[in-house]
Image: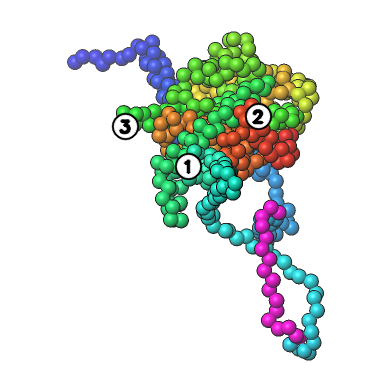
Amino acid sequence: MPKPVIPSASRASSEVDALRQQVEALTEENEHLKLLVAKYRRMHFGQKAESQAQLGQLDLALAYDPLAIKLAESVKPSPAANDAEIEKRSRKRKPFPETLPRETVTHMPPATDCPDCGGPFKPLGDDVSEMLEYVPASFKVVRHVRPKLACAHCDHIAQAEAPSRPIPRGIAGPALLAHMLVGKFCDHLPLYRQSAIYARSGLDLDRALLTEWVGHCHELLSPLVETIRRYVLGGPKVHADDTPLPVLSPGKGRTKTARLWTYVRDDRPAGSDDPPAVWFAYSEDRKGHHPRDHLKSFRGVLQADAYAGFNALYETGNIQEAACWAHVRRKFVDVYRANGSPIAAEAIARIATLYGIEAQIRGQLPVERRAARQAEARPRLHELRDWLETQNQRVSRKSGIADAIGYALNQWSALMYYTTDGRVEVDNNAAERALRTVALGRRNYLFGGSDAGGERAASMYCLIGSAKLNGIDPEAYLNTVLARIAEHPINRIDELLPWNLYPAQAAPLQKAA
C-alpha cells in the first residue's frame, strides 16, 4: 500500500502565499468593479440633468462631503418651527416682474346700496391680488408696401428701397428666426418638434426649411462670432474644456464622435469689469491639434483639465497651465461614494477648506486674492501634499483611491499655480458651466446631422452663451442683431456684442459672483 504524500512545509507556505496574493488581487479587482458600477449608476440613474444644471460643481461635491453631512445632521429645527410654519414659508413666492404687462379687472359688489339700511356705499380701500396668466404665442404677417410715385412734369419715378431681410428673399423675420434659434440651442427643442408646433397654427414650416434658416443665420452671424472669438482669446486667462457630440457619418449609416470645444473669458471673480464671453469651436474628433489651432494666437493662462492635447501648448512657453481642483475632488468623491473610503473622506474635507478660502475672497482684486491664498491656502496645500504622498505609500497600486491620489500628485505644480496668480480660479467650473447647455440639448436631439450642423451649433452656442453670461435675454439679443446685422458696417461689428447692445443690463453684472 503506497504511503500518502505529505507536502513539505516550504511547499505549503508557498501555496498559502499564492492563495493570499490571489485573494488580494480579487479584492482589488472587486473594489475597482464597485467603483465602475457606482459611476455607471450615477450616469444613468442619477439626478436629472436639469437639476444638476442648477448646481455648481462645488455644491455638487459638497453634497457628498462627510463633514458637510455631519454639520447638516447636527442642525436641529427650532421648536417653534412647526409643520404649518414650514409649509407657509415654503409657499412664499417672489413678486412678479415689473416688466410684465398688467391687466386690471375690477370686481364691484352686486348692490350699489347697503342691504341693511339702504344707505349709499363709500370707498374704503381695495384688496388686490395677482394671478399669472399665459398669452399663447402668435404669428403675424407684416406687409411691406412701397408706393410708386411719378412726377407730374417728367418721367421720374420715386420709390422707397425695399427693407433688408435677414435671409435674402426669405419669408422669416428676425423675431421668428431668433425664436427658432433659441428654441433649439437654448431650450433644447429639436427642429422637427418646432415644425410640429408651428403646424398647429396652420403654418407649413418643415424641418428642411428650418434647417436652411439655421444655415443662413450661421453665415450672417459669423462675423460677430469671429469678433467674440478674438475678444475671448485676447484676455489674460481662458477656461477651456470639451464635450462629445455625436454626428452622422456620411455613407456609413452610423454616428461618429465629434467634439465641441468651449473657451470662456470671465474675470468677474477677480474683480474685473471686463464683460464675460464664451466661444465654441467644432471639430470632427478630439485630436490634440484642434486646441493647438484654436489657441495658436493666445498668450496667457489656460485653465483646463489634464487632457494631453494641451501639453504642446504649455511647452511653447506662451501659455501657462493652471489645473482644476474640482476634477481632483470629483475623483475622491467617486471613490467615497463607491466604498466609503476614509482616505477619500479626509481628502474631500481638506480640499473643502481651500474652497472656503475662495468663498471669502471672491470678487476681490487679484493682488488681494493672491495675498490671501499665499497666507492661508499654500500652507494647507503643502500639508495636503505630504499627507497624499504618505497615503500613496499605504494603498494598493490598483485601487481607485490610488488613482485619485496619483491624479492629484501628477498635476501638483499646475494645481498650485492659482496661489501665485490672483487672476486665476481654483477650478475650471466656468468652462464646465458653459458646456451644460450642450449636454442638455444632446439628450433631446441625440446627434448632429453633419459637420456643417456642428459648426452651426458652435456659432449659436457662442452667441447665446455670451448673452446669458451678461444677463441678457438671448432671444431679445438675437432678434436685435438679426434685424440690424445685414446692413451694419463690418468695421463697427463690435457695436453688436451683447454688452454693447444692452449696456444697462450687462453693467450691474460685471462684478457678480
Q: Position of residue 178 (x, y in %)?
A: 55, 43
Marks 3/2: CA distance?
A: 45 Å
Q: Which of marks 3 and 1 is in front?
A: 1
Q: Position of 424 compared to 328: left or right?
A: right
* Rendering quarter of residue 190: top left
For residue 111: magenta?
Answer: yes
User: Which residue is tagged 1?
Assistant: 170
Q: Position of residue 496 (x, y in %)?
A: 64, 34
Residue type, mark 1 in image: Gly
User: Which residue is tagged 3?
Assistant: 253
Q: How many marks?
A: 3
Secondary structure of the residue carrying tag 2 is helix
Residue type, mark 2 in image: Arg
Marks 3/1: CA distance?
A: 33 Å
Going 67% across and 37% down the picture, which residue do you hit?
Answer: 501
| Residue at the front extreme, as displayed | 153
CB contact under 8 Å: marks 3 and 1: no
Please give the label number shown on residue 25.
none
Marks 1/2: CA distance?
A: 25 Å
Q: How crowded is mark 1: few (under 14 residues within 10 Å), some or many (20 or more)?
A: few
Secondary structure of the residue carrying tag 1 is loop
Q: Which circle's residue, 3 or 1, is located before the other in the chain?
A: 1
> Which contiguous range is marked in magenta?
97-114
User: Which residue is tagged 2?
Assistant: 492
Q: How crowded is mark 2: few (under 14 residues within 10 Å), some or many (20 or more)?
A: few
Q: Which circle's residue, 3 or 2, is located before the other in the chain?
A: 3
Residue type, mark 3 in image: Gly
